[in-house]
Image: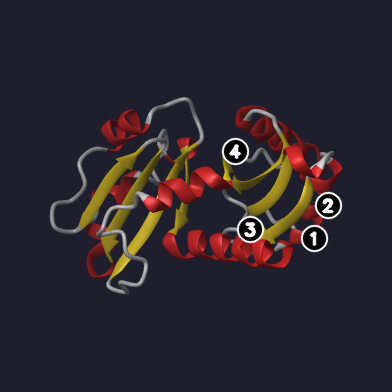
Amino acid sequence: MEQACMKRYVALLRGINLGGKNKILMHDLQKAFFDLGFAEVETILNSGNILFSASSASRKQMSRQIAEKVQDAFGYAIPVSVVEFGHLQHVLDHAPSWWDTDDKSRYHNLIFILTDDSPQAICQLVGEPSEGKEKIEVFEDVIFWSYDLGCYQKCSWWNRTAAKGIAEKLTIRTGNTIQKICRKQGKRNEKVV
């Protein structure tokens, strides 16, 4: 693959290494990405966040390839969302003012949709956020979501996003995880310059 036509992506695998389920060593996951022909593969944390470079291909095609590889190599049917890194930066540039990952009294999340459902359809399916306890805002293909840590169990979205019929449509990353992904890519950019 020529470096000039390569783009940077982040793959978000739903449900990797959570609560002792779907265990995959990050080294093995990284190797699986290299086996697919992706370059400059880097894992972030231990929960299915992978930065990689690839030549132009559709995000849906890459998501499907990765999901099939994970199934073949590890035996897990794992939903995958692939996001072009430039798009992720664009999304974060449009975060609502209340989505402040430094505010420790609130828990901030970014919701990525794994299906063909629109963010608006997901919002309708999940229902209204609990007034005064949580906030949501759609931007393009993601949903920003924050809730009050002091009363999270009373938040409708906290309960409903984990419900059958909804949970499998989403993969959720905390604001802190998103920041770590961006920092990892930032360090890589510094090395390249």
The percent position of residue 104, horizontal first and vertical second, equals 32, 74
Q: List the residue tagged with mark 3.
A: 17
Q: Nearer the viewer, residue 192 or 156?
A: 192
Q: Which mark is residue 51?
A: none
**Location of residue 180 with respect to 159 vertically, above or below:** below
Q: Residue at x 69, y 29 (%)?
A: 57
Q: Earlier in the sequence, mark 2 or mark 3?
A: 3
**Location of residue 128 with respect to 64 vertically, above or below:** below
Q: Callout 2, which amino acid?
A: Lys
The percent position of residue 80, horizontal first and vertical second, equals 60, 39
| CB-based contact (under 8 Å), mark 1 and mark 2 | yes
Q: List the residue tagged with mark 4.
A: 79
Q: List the residue tagged with mark 2.
A: 31
Q: Secondary structure at mark 4?
A: loop
Q: List the residue tagged with mark 1.
A: 27
Give the Cα separation between the discs numbered 4 and 2: 19 Å
In the rendered image, which quarter is residue 64 located in? top right
Q: Secondary structure at mark 1?
A: helix
Give the Cα separation between the discs numbered 3 and 4: 14 Å
Q: Residue at x 32, y 64 (%)?
A: 100
Q: Callout 4, which amino acid?
A: Pro
Q: Is residue 12 visible?
A: yes
Dot 1 alpha-carbon crowd within 10 angstroms: few under 14, some 14 to 19, many 20 or more: few
Dot 3 alpha-carbon crowd within 10 angstroms: few under 14, some 14 to 19, many 20 or more: some
Q: Earlier in the sequence, mark 4 or mark 2?
A: 2
The percent position of residue 34, horizontal first and vertical second, equals 83, 47
